[in-house]
Amino acid sequence: MIPLQSMDKIKKLSRIQLITGAFIVILAIIIGMIVYGSIRFYLLSKKINTLSMQVSSLENRFASSTDKLNENMIKTNTLYDTFRQNMVDIEHKIGTYRQEVGSYTSTVDTLQKLSKIDPQLLAKYSKVFFLNENYAPARLIEIPSEYYYSNLKVLKLYTQVWPYLQRMLDEANKADMNIYIQSAYRSFNEQKAIKGQNSVIYGAGSANSFSADQGYSEHQLGTTVDLITKGLGGNLEGFDKTKAYDWLLGNAYRFGFILSYPKDNKFYVFEPWHWRFVGVKLATELHNQNRNFYDMDQRVIDDYLAFFFD
C-alpha cells in the first residue's frame, strides 16, 4: 500500500500539473489570439492603406476633372457671351434692315399713291397756277339731288371726294345745321361765262375781287363746293353769320375741307361759303396751326399729296 503522505504528495503534484497545463493552454490561446489579431490588424491596415491610396487617386482625378470642368465652363461662358453679343449685333442689323425695308416699302407705297393722284389737286390756283381749257377731273360723279339747295342744274364732284363731303353734310344735318350745296364742279368754259357775267354786272375791276378768271378757279378741280343754308333766301352773302358756318369752322377739317378765302386773304374777298377738299391730314394741320392754305409754300403742300385720300 502507498503511504498516506505519498498519496497527498501525488494529489498535490497532479493539481500542480493540471493548473500548469491549464495555464499553458490559456497562454497558448492568448498568444494565438494575439497572433490572429496581429494578422487581422496587418491585413486591415493593408486594406486601409489600399483604400486610402484609391481615395487619394479618386480625389486627384476629381480635382483634375473639376479643373477641366471649370475650364470648360469658362470657355462655355466666353462662347455664350460671344454668341449673345453676336445675336445682339444680328438683331440690331435685322432691325436696321427692317427699317430700311420699311423705308423702301413706304417710299414705294408713296410713289404708287402719287402715280395715281392728279398732282393738280393740291396746287395753289387763284391767280397763281393756271388750268387750261382742256383740264378736267379724271372722274366725276353726279351728286344726289337731296344735297342740292336748288335743282336748277346737275352738280358734279370728284368721285373720290364725294364720300368725304357726303359724310360731312350728313353729320351737319344730324346736328340740325341744314347745309346744302349751291355750286360744285365748273368747267373752264362755265367759269369763263360766270366771270363774263360778273364783269358786265359789276365791272371788270370789282369782279376780279370776288370772281376767278377761267383756269384759275378751284371749282375746275372738282374738289371745291359753295355751301349754303336755309334762311338766306338763296344768297351766299351772310353765310358767315349762320350757325352752319360756325359748325364748318369747327368740323370741316375732320372731313378734309378748308376755307380757301378767309378774312384778309391776299387773293379774293372773304368767301365763307367756299370750301375746298385738301385731304384730312393737311386740313387737320392747317386747322391745328390756324394757318391758311394759300400762305403755305407749294413745296410743303406737295408733301401732303400722297395722303390726299387717306
Image (spheres, grey):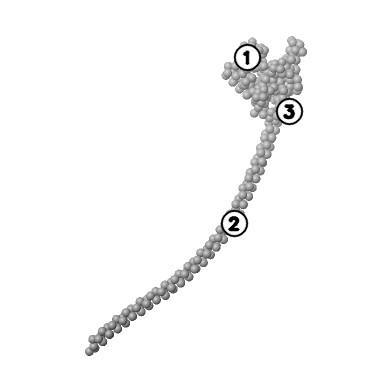
Q: What residue did someone put label 2 on?
A: 71
The residue positioned 60% from the left and 19% from the top of the image is 172
Near mark 1 (Cα within 10 A), the count class, few <14, some 14-19 or many ≥20, is: some
The x, y position of residue 138, in whole percent, is 70, 25
Q: Amino acid at mark 3?
A: Arg
In this rendering, the answer to whether 20 lies above or below 239 is below
Nearest the camera: 288 or 247? 288
Nearest the camera: 297 or 36? 36
Q: Amino acid at mark 1?
A: Thr
Using the rendered view, name the quadrant where residue 283 is placed: top right
Q: Amino acid at mark 2?
A: Glu
Q: What residue did someone put label 1 on?
A: 242
> Secondary structure under badge 3?
helix
Q: Is residue 159 visible?
A: no
Position of residue 41 in the picture relative to residue 137 (left or right): left
Near mark 3 (Cα within 10 A), the count class, few <14, some 14-19 or many ≥20, is: few
In this rendering, the answer to whether 169 lies above or below 29 is above
CB within 8 Å, label 2 to label 3: no
- Label 3 and label 1: CA atoms lie apart by 35 Å
